[in-house]
Structures are given as C-alpha cells and as structure tokens.
C-alpha cells in the first residue's frame, strides 16, 4: 500500500492509502464528496534520522576508499605486567 496526497479546493489536503500504482488523478473528497486533484510531492526523503544518514554516507564512502587504521577500533591497549609473582599465575583476559 502506498500513501497518496490529494487536495480539495474546499477542504484542503488529505491522504489516501491505495495499492501501488492504483492512484487516479482525482478522487472524491472524504468531507464534501467534491473532486480532489492529486498532489505530487517528494516521497518522504527528509525523514531519515541524521545519525542513520551519516552512517550510510560513511559506509558508502568506505566502500570506495577504506579508512586505514593502526589498531582494532574499540580495543583497549594491553595492560601492564602484574607486579607480584602471585599475580603472574592469574588468568589473562
């Protein structure tokens, strides 16, 4: 189902959900039953959250020219050696 936008000259804009490709150029207004013409608008292009858009842009850019890193991201540097002999026998993470 797709959402189509129509404009009645008397009652203003309203939306109609119809099967994809099933929208006519005019439909009856749900309020006054007069003819309402179809309004052409962008299909929700501005509804992507900013963080998602940024992540998608970075993923597309890295496909062309990947970033070079010196270590695995998010990994902590190696811990210093334990101070005493008893600590040396503990398991390492």
Image: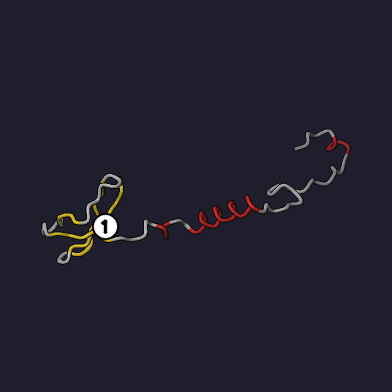
In the rendered image, which residue does mark 1 sit on?
5
Q: Quadrant of residue 13?
A: bottom left
Q: Quadrant of residue 57?
A: bottom right
Task: Please tell me how crowded label 1 is: few (under 14), some (14-19), or many (20+) other residues with Cα within 10 Å.
Answer: some
Specify whether 4 is left or right of 91: left
Scheme by which the image is coloured: secondary structure
Specify whether 38 is left or right of 68: left
Residue 77 on image: x %, y % = 77, 48
Q: Residue at x 38, y 57 (%)?
A: 44
Location of the C terminus by quadrant is top right
Q: Which residue lies furthest to the right in this view?
A: 85
Specify whether 68 is left or right of 87: left
Q: Which residue lies furthest to the bottom in this view?
A: 9
Residue 80 on image: x %, y % = 83, 46
Q: Callout 1: helix, strand or loop?
A: strand
Is 59 situated above or below 42? above
Residue 38 on image: x %, y % = 24, 59
Toward the viewer: 80 or 75?
75
Q: Residue at x 21, y 62 (%)?
A: 7
Q: Residue at x 51, y 54 (%)?
A: 52
Specify whether 16 is left or right of 91: left
Residue 5 on image: x %, y % = 26, 57
For the image, the number of numbered tags is 1
């Amino acid at each position: 189902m797709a959402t189509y936008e129509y404009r009645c000259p008397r009652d203003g804009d309203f939306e109609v959900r119809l099967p994809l490709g099933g929208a006519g150029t005019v439909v009856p207004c749900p309020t006054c039953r007069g003819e309402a013409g179809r309004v052409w608008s962008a299909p929700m292009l501005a509804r992507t959250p900013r963080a998602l858009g940024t992540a998608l842009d970075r993923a597309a850019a890295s496909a062309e020219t990947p970033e070079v890193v010196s270590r695995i991201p998010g990994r902590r540097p190696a811990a210093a050696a334990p101070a005493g002999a008893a600590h040396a026998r503990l398991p390492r993470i």
